[in-house]
Image: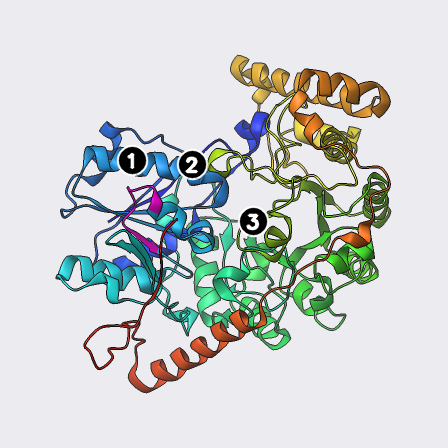
Amino acid sequence: MLFINPAQEKFGGFLSRYVPVGIPVAIGCLSAYLTKQGIKCRVVDEELIELTPSVLRELVDGLERPYVFGLSCLTAHVVRAYQLAAMIKAEFPDSIIVAGGLHPTACPDEPLQTGNIDYVVRGEGEEVMLQLHGALRGGADPTKLKGVSFKRAGRIVHNPEAPLIPDLDDIPMFPYELFDNPKYDMAFITSSRGCPYKCTYCSQRMLTGTTYRYKSAGRIVQELDVLVNRYGQKQIVFYDDNFCFKAKRVSEVCSAIIDAGLHKKCTFSVQTRADNFPPDMVPILAAAGFTHAGFGMETGVNRLAQLIGKGETVEQHLEAVDLGKRHGFDVSLFMIFGLPTETAEERATSFRVVQGAKVQASKYNNLIPYPGTPIFTDLQKSDRIHIEPGWSNFNSTLSVTRSIFDRTPLPYVPETTSEFELKRDIIKYNMKTYVTPRAVTAILLGKKGPGWYQLPERWFLTPRELYHVARIGVNVVVNMAVAFLPLRITEPIMNWLNPAMRARPRIEGYDASAFSASQWDKDSAKQKTVVLKAAQEERKATGRVNIALPVVRDGTSKTEERVGV
């Protein structure tokens, strides 16, 4: 089987040359899971190699026919995924194409309606993909599996959802050897899945509900040992959505790291919530070599935090920042601009709050109302949301990594601001953060930039690198010049250059109370928990989890059908 990570464009825009490529974790996990069961798998990442018919033929050489392809789809990449599916079917008409990931889980009808994708795996993919592949190769009926969507006689069928994997220790170690490439930033580990909180903009909850599962401390240390002692990693990031949710497990992981002596060879970084970062936990983390914590603060205004279901306050974040700094942590804050009803004054307030916290790094991205989230449900009928063909503008770094003259529309602009004003503010506050004498000097000396970019060593001795750095410099200077000029001067000019921006002006006197925020469906989250508990009990009793549909008296399997639009 060939797993593919489609790429629409290089992450980072004009900065992409100096942004480490993130490893496509999803296809790595899937490949490892199937390989453990004796299935021959290959992976390809379009961030590194563009797929053409000739490249495809080379990649599938030696694989069993009919070829089975797995496409991992994030929302911003689905347009490329659909292009690849069409190319694959043209080259190998008898091939079987499976789409999975966050976007197909949220919009399972969409890929099936292209006519080129045969199956959609919804939710967590490892076990469903394993059994689907087994059915396809073994002559069984693949439409009898939970978690699978497909087309039958012109109708789209969605089988009931499959249970989550009961024990994450059952998932094989991540296959770092498949991604041993200097272009990748390999220094990561995933030790848990899920987050039980209710942020209305977070798409990850579609996969895990309110469940939270984690690997054992011993298993985590095994993976860290590979990264440290085989690959020589000195700084490792825990990719967990919320590393610190379970205090007892954090203590166990820290003790295991210390017992293995890894804290003497490496430092660690976590992402967590401010209200899961208590005073009694932080010294334990520090003793185990944790030196960085990132918090998704999102906004410096409590009204907006409440609106998006954060469940924590600005004050809690500032307390967590202060606590981390007192124990030697570098701290990063991640912000979202363009939240519903947010004003320019509130963005300025958020920036002042972050600056006052004196954190090591901060980022300001535009809101992405991902399909399947409550915030998308609230906004999808609004004339303030704009979806480009293939969702190609659903990119959270649109403003800061592109020229200010770029015509790609932001996916959402609240009524309380104009499109150019929002884009300008995102650029302005990021530039105020990054373009400082200290930050620029560090970058030019080849040190890692504030969070995510780095120039190669001795770049100034290479004409090509000098050229690219000069291009970046020009883009930065132009963006700053436009962003820092008064809005009354720049907005009319930008609206004249890009008339489409006039469609979403600032509405003076807009009543913020008119916006009513939805929340996550409680029954849906509860169902995932119930199904997971049943799977855990089944695994304990039988050693496995069955995801086949139950057979009813007439000999058929229960499915949930709806006609494809």
The residues tagged by marks 2 and 3 sit, at their Cα atoms, a distance apart of: 15 Å
The residues tagged by marks 1 and 2 sit, at their Cα atoms, a distance apart of: 11 Å
Above or below for 58 versus 230: above
Image quadrant of residue 538? Answer: bottom left
**Amino acid at pointer 1:** Ala
Above or below for 190 versus 114: below
* Residue behind mark 1: 86
Mark 3 secondary-structure assignment: loop
**Amino acid at pointer 3:** Tyr
* Residue behind mark 3: 370
The residues tagged by marks 3 and 1 sit, at their Cα atoms, a distance apart of: 25 Å
The answer, for residue 212, to whether it is visible in the render is no
Q: Is residue 344 magenta?
A: no
Residue 520 position in % (x across, y down): 60, 64
Q: Which residues are magenta?
A: 113-120
Residue 140 position in % (x across, y down): 16, 64
Image quadrant of residue 288? Answer: bottom right
- Residue 548 lies left or right of residue 104; in this view the side is left
- Residue 87 lies left or right of residue 104; in this view the side is left
Q: Residues within 10 Å of mark 3 (few under 14, many from 20)?
A: many
Above or below for 58 versus 522: above
Residue at left 25%, top 36%? 88
The answer to whether marks 3 and 1 mark residues whose Cβ atoms lie closer than 8 Å is no
